[in-house]
Amino acid sequence: MRVMPAWIRGVAMLAATAIAWGGMFSVLKPLLSILDPFTLTLIRFGLAAPILVISLLAVEGRAALSFEGQALRLWWLGTLAFAGFGLLLVIGLRLTQPQHAAVVPALMPLIAVIITGIRTQTMPAPRGLLAVLIGLTGVVLVVTSGRPTILLEGGVGGGEALVLAGATCWVLYTLGAADFPGWSGLRYTTLTLMLGTVTIMAVEMIALASEYATLPDGTALLRAAPGMAFMVLAASVMGFLFWNAGMRALGPRMGILFINLVPVTAFTIALIGGQVPSPWELVGVSLVIGALIVNSFASRQKAFLSTDPTVD
């Protein structure tokens, strides 16, 4: 039986993750009318963590739960990803619209390029840089309907800035996986989520004490259950596992471009909801898709030969 090439599995996993995260924004917005951001985040990751722990035990055994002397580093990465990106995302979304918040993660490729360039003191390959610029241009056109100048007129506010800060945290977390080359994506995700959830619990306690958060009653939890099921199972458990495994298959510089599918998904959901796209919005979506093709497929042979041929 022929084994599916690692790069195909990587593409499929990253695309599925980006689509799930794109749909996440339209799910999170109504949830924020039921739960405060701190409690919502704690429930989301507090339920996802034991599911991943059980999965890790079943697949790799008890030895995989060992931190191998890297507990502090793993805690910091988990805090960046889940307390950082997770909390800043929902707090920012509370202050803005889903479509605006969904477009911000598309800046992750540019953030990654900047961080990687600073760390290595090198310039990115022309093809990769071109793909990032095309994708960003497409995202701007989608959000502004072909009028980029509105971004200079207050089109991006405090909510978007918080989501941008969270996106930077997520990029640092993604790049941090390179420090654990012998670990599976499942192990890296599980251990960082376990430790990151500890930070979220501490933040929740502070928020409760300062009355920025409240404990929900049974009625509120029942109303939130369908949306939280999606957040826990699709956006968290599946999303984190597929993201880390896909990034290992394709490499950070290529894999992170799939985040451009997040605003495309949010745009599609809006279209299904009856919002007719403008010609500029259609052009923008085409550019985002084109960026993925330019970087992920046109340079496939050269890039994939340099990555690990296996995927967790």
Image (cartoon, rainbow, N blue to C red):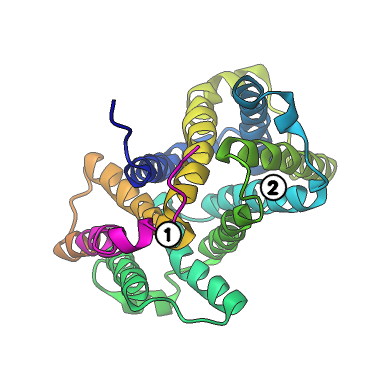
265 relative to 241, above or below: below
Which range is magenta? 286-312
Q: Quadrant of residue 33?
A: top right
Work out whether residue 285 or residue 306 is closer to the camera in this orientation and state it. Answer: 306
- Amino acid type indicated by mark 1: Ser
The residue that appears at 51% across and 28% down in the rendered structure is: 233
Question: Looking at the picture, how far across and down is residue 118, in whole percent?
Answer: 59, 78
> Is residue 309 left or right of 272 when viewed as pictured?
right
Question: Looking at the picture, how far across and down is residue 64, in whole percent?
Answer: 70, 32
166 relative to 19, above or below: below
- Amino acid type indicated by mark 2: Gly
Q: Quadrant of residue 154?
A: bottom left
Question: Looking at the picture, how far across and down is residue 215, in whole percent?
Answer: 73, 30
Instruction: Report the residue that reaches farthest toward the front.
Output: 1
Work out whether residue 15 or residue 146 is closer to the camera in this orientation and state it. Answer: 15
300 relative to 82, above or below: below
Question: Looking at the picture, how far across and down is residue 203, in whole percent?
Answer: 78, 45
Spatial CA span between label 2 and label 1? 27 Å
275 relative to 286, above or below: above
Q: Which residue is mark 1?
A: 306
Q: Quadrant of the N terminus?
A: top left
Crowding around mark 1 (Cα neighbors within 10 Å: few <14, some 14 to 19, many 20+) is: few
> Is residue 94 left or right of 258 when viewed as pictured?
right
Magenta-drawn stretch contains 31: no
The reply to whether residue 36 is in sight is no
Q: Which residue is mark 2?
A: 78
N-terminal of the two: label 2 or label 1?
A: 2
Magenta-drawn stretch contains 292: yes
